[in-house]
Image (tube, rainbow, N blue to C red):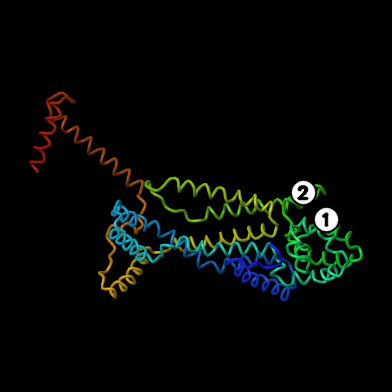
Amino acid sequence: MLLTKSNTFIIGPVATLLGIIMNAIFMFCSGVFGIQNIGLCIILFTIVIYALMVPMTIKQQKFSKLSAYMNPEIQRIQKKYNGKQDQASMMKMNEETKAVYAKYGVSPTGSCLPMLIQFPILFALYRVIWNVPAYVDGVKDAMMGLVNQILAFDGAQELLTDLATQNQVNFEKLGFNANSIVDTLYKLKPADWTTLNDLFPSLTDSIQSTQETLDRMNYFLGLNISDTPLNIMMTAFNEKSWLLVIGALMIPLLAGLTQWLNTKLMPQQETSSNDNSTMTSSLKMMNNIMPIMSIVFCFTLPTGLGIYWIASAVVRSIVQIITNKSMDNMDIEALVEKNLEKENQKRAKQGLPPQKVSAQEKARMTVKEPEDPEKKQIADEARKKKIQDSTEYYQKHSEAKPGSIAAKARMVEQYNEKNKKK
């Protein structure tokens, strides 16, 4: 989490790429609007990143929508080869399953692949936001004047070690250099700047100037994005700054609320009575736990990450609403026919017979009109009247005692005579 960029496999290069985007946004806001604010950049940065991820989101939602139609066919194939472990049966089952996926135009990895791609992006996002000076040149440059003065100060390392340790910067591991000092200065809390001024009284003007510049960059809606909401609340509570307490409290609460909204908008997998209830329960539990986890994390993580958390949930919700409407208007039957045509062209080249969609499968794809309650009631009443009239007819033409075996035998005889006449 320090200024020296990590070369961790996948995460490092992705973080570097995202850092370039973050730096470009900072330069754009600074050059065009004259605004140098990391909080605003985080929001714009989140919008840009999730806009780039929209194709993956749509692909994932498309897979979820089509799964409701594919699963019965896949389950029939699995049932067909249930208990058959020989290689020939396994290969035929795989071929038939693959054909179903091809018919619906999705990949067997359509559900997990977008998520696997998103994971390194999300981890890289955290790295960029947690350690802004490593990626945004303007923030680092704002501190370099003071950093060079500290480096030239005799005994600076010994004086600054305690402050660095408190802010999780290890001089012994990283060395006492410009990068490690930048890491230390960027993570300083308001009280720490007073301590820094006491340690370097001859650098008071530079310290105050650097603090004011970083405050303009780091404060968003009155909150220091490099400090945690919990620390802000405790400090504000001691100073009886109730507005600041409420502002800090809103970050984790909004993070939880927007996360909850996002889970509610996510399309839920349609389940049947044969589905694994444990998996369904686990999914519901995860959806309930995620908002709570968001609240807990955003209390103890820097406010900048909380802003990102909120902005990302809002952007995902907007994208989800758009994709939900798109998926609702999707013609499943037309999509299957189009994909089936492409698949049959491939099969023809391989000398294989074409696939067809059965009438039963087409019926499942067709949305049924809801039954009219009034018509249903009329039909029920007509059916009851018919049964009653029939019962009265047989009782009327029977001399036996109603309910007796003889009466029942006579009813059967009369029924046969009545139908024989017809």
Residue 39: x %, y % from top left: 70, 63
Residue type at numbered disc 1: Ala
Label total for image: 2
Residue type at numbered disc 2: Met
The vertical placement of 417 against 368, above or below, is: above
SS at circle 1 = helix
Residue 42: x %, y % from top left: 67, 65
Residue 319, picture quadrant: bottom right
Q: Quadrant of the C terminus?
A: top left
| Residue at 51%, 56% in the rendered image | 266
SS at circle 2 = helix
Q: Which residue is mark 2?
A: 234
Please name which of the two marks, 2 or 1, marks the residue nearer to the observer. 1
Q: Is residue 154 left or right of residue 275?
A: right
Q: Is residue 50 left or right of residue 58?
A: right
Q: Is residue 60 left or right of residue 34?
A: left
Residue 70, picture quadrant: bottom left
Q: Nearer the viewer, residue 359 or 84?
A: 84
Residue 192, picture quadrant: bottom right
Q: Which mark is residue 265?
A: none
Residue 20: x %, y % from top left: 65, 73
Q: Quadrant of the N terminus?
A: bottom right
Q: Which residue is mark 1?
A: 191
Q: Pointer 1: residues within 10 angstroms few (<14), some, or many (20+)?
A: few
Q: Nearer the viewer, residue 71 or 409?
A: 71
| Residue at 34%, 57% in the rendered image | 74
